[in-house]
């Protein structure tokens, strides 16, 4: 599965076994947040104050796993 910034957080967490660990490393506790299941990756990142550049790097990292 190719992850983009528009991919739903729920889909990322279901499809990518390493996603939770990667998200925790960036300060996002998405696994335990009910809102995350209704947001895109970009929405969650913006809510945590991440810049577009940081989001792009996170997308790249998620796609490497």
Image: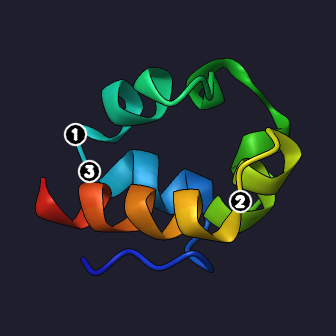
Q: Is residue 8 left or right of residue 33?
A: left
- 10 left or right, relative to 38: left
Where is residue 65? Give x, y as percent: 12, 53
Estimate the x, y position of residue 9 in percent, counting from the top left: 59, 55
The answer for how far apart the CA atoms under marks 3 and 1 are is: 4 Å
Occupied quadrant, residue 41: bottom right
* Closer-to-camera residue (5/32): 5
Instruction: Locate residue 33: give its quadrant.
Output: top right
Question: Image point 62% across, 29% down: which residue?
Answer: 28
Q: Are marks 3 and 1 in contact (CB under 8 Å)?
A: yes
Q: Which residue is mark 2?
A: 51
Quarter of the N terminus within the rendering: bottom left
Q: Crowding near pointer 3: few (<14 within 10 Å), some, many (20+)? A: some
Left or right of residue 35: residue 4: left
Q: Which residue is mark 3?
A: 16
- Label 1 crowd bin: few (<14), some (14–19), many (20+), radius 10 Å: few
- The image position of residue 61, as x and y in percent, is 26, 56
- In x, y percent, where is residue 26? 50, 30
Q: CA distance from mark 3 to mark 2?
A: 23 Å
Q: Nearer the viewer, mark 3 or mark 2?
A: 2
Nearer the observer, disc 2 or disc 1? 2
- Secondary structure under the numbered disc 1 in the rendered image: loop
**Residue beneath disc 1:** 17
């Amino acid at each position: 599965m190719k992850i983009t910034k528009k991919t739903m957080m729920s889909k990322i967490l279901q499809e990518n076994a390493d996603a939770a660990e990667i998200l925790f490393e960036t300060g996002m506790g998405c696994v335990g947040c009910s809102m995350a299941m209704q947001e895109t990756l970009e929405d969650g990142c913006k809510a945590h104050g991440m810049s577009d550049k940081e989001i792009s790097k996170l997308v790249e990292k998620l796609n490497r796993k």
